[in-house]
Amino acid sequence: MRFRRAVALMVMTLLVPGSAQLLHGNRRVGLIAIRVWLGSILALVLIALASLVRHQVAFQLASDANFLLLLRLFLMAGAVGWAVLFMDAWRIGQPLTLGLVQRRAAIGVNGFLSLAVAGVLLFGSHLVGVQRDLMVTMFNATEVKGAHDGRFNIALFGGDAGAGRWGLRPDSINVASVDASTGRTVLISLPRNLQDFPFAPGSVMDEQFPEGFDCDGCYLNGVSTWAQDNPELFGDSENPGIDATLMAIEGVTGLEMNYWAMANLEGFKDLVDAVGGITLNVREPIPVGGLGDDVTGYLEPGVRKLDGFETLWYARAREGSDDYSRMARQKCVLNAMLGQVSPQTAVTNFGSIAEASSDMVSTNLPASQVGRFVELALKAKGQKMSTVSLVPPLINTADPDIELMHRKVAEAIAKAEGTFKAPEKAAVSAGGTTGGSSGAGAGTSSPVTGGSLGSLSEGYLANQADDLGSAC
């Protein structure tokens, strides 16, 4: 009977911490513990209900550094306090009055329960700490920018220039235009070798190049380097290269940028590994290596699950392909990451994802806006991603038609929003198609056909699908 009583006291402490003390020990300690326990449950229920009504509540709390610090300290204190309550429950059970076998069993049960509960709370505290470090490290900007015409426009850069300088010269340049209400996204790809383009009217770069960026060897991905060499023009800016590139993107697309994010492609493989890999349709053998280095192997064709190293080469390979096929493959990777990474995977591998993300990404998105964009990302996950690529044959990169580029971007956004009105008479476009499927930027519903890297480039860019996955 004494052994059953001792075990019952431990189980009571597991189910309602403080109940053993309230009944058979220090009632004051028991009351304090029960009140803290009930208060915690009540707070959890209220947060859960608020999150069900308005999902952004949970995302805002998860991105608030001060709240995360308090939660982490609370979990650590809870782990210690609950373990102490288990020890006191064991004491109240009078272990010295038990037989040797029963005493050992009571010690084993008590040790298992106290270590299990404390371990769970400390692990939760660790995850909260990881989340807080991610928020503090990555999202340290403070300026909040509202939507433009109901959309958030985010410039996405991929840097691939080597250790210590990957952010200086973007290797890939995309714009994600996201509907501020529905999350419906249009992904706009810009060729890095674009020349003779204008900057945002009235900007610093527009003052320096009023006739466009027409200097010798000046390309879109070289704007950053030019600005880094002339930082005095950008005042106190911490990122003159990015600021100048944003001015160029605004001039090329006709969209006003809200935020930017720069991803280190070399570190991208760690993120893919953290989520367990992604599945892609490899249409032709993709070389690993090349362009100055030996080709060490190939990614064989077929629908395959690629790890981080393989995904990196799928996205970056240049041997035997051109910039436009690389752009197509990079879009496939972005779409796969959006569509295939489940919430369960994100939670299970949270620590690795957070570590990889903080090493890979820099951005000017404030922590206060993370919740909003997480909610939009979840909405976007269940919708088709539209795409427009401002590349040949639609666009002559050496002498681009800026008005045409602006029109194609506006058409793609209008189609995504369901407000596009096709012209009454079909007209043959520069891309060689008619009517609503006007060339490389139209975003038609035709799938990509063809089997070579060249056909992936030409077919994909000439007949882009509203559902990007059908091209990948």
Image (cartoon, grey):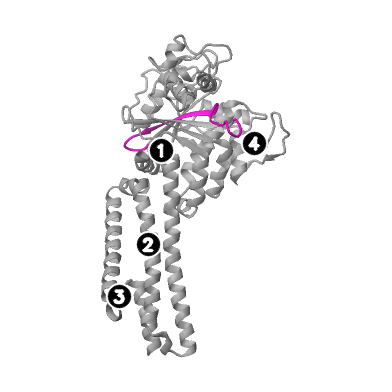
Q: Position of residue 277 (x, y in %)?
A: 56, 47
- Element type at mark 3: helix
Q: Residues within 10 Å of mark 3 (few under 14, many from 20)?
A: many
Of badges 2 and 4, the one in the foreground is: 2
* C-alpha span from label 1 to label 4: 42 Å
- Which residue is tagged 1? 140
**Quarter in which the C terminus is drawn:** top right
**Magenta residues, as a range?**
161-183
Q: Amino acid at mark 3?
A: Ser
* C-alpha span from label 4 to label 3: 66 Å
In the rendered structure, which disc, 3 or 1, sits on the residue that comes first in sequence?
3
- Which residue is tagged 4? 284
In the rendered structure, which disc, 3 or 2, sits on the residue that comes first in sequence?
3
- Element type at mark 4: loop
Which residue shows up at 30% across the image and 69% down it? 33
Q: Position of residue 418 (x, y in %)?
A: 34, 31
Front-lying residue, 99 or 431: 99
Of badges 3 and 2, the one in the foreground is: 2
**100 w.r.t. 227: above or below:** below
**191 w.r.t. 22: above or below:** above
Q: Amino acid at mark 4?
A: Glu
Q: Amino acid at mark 1?
A: Asn
* C-alpha span from label 3 to label 1: 44 Å
- Which residue is tagged 3? 19
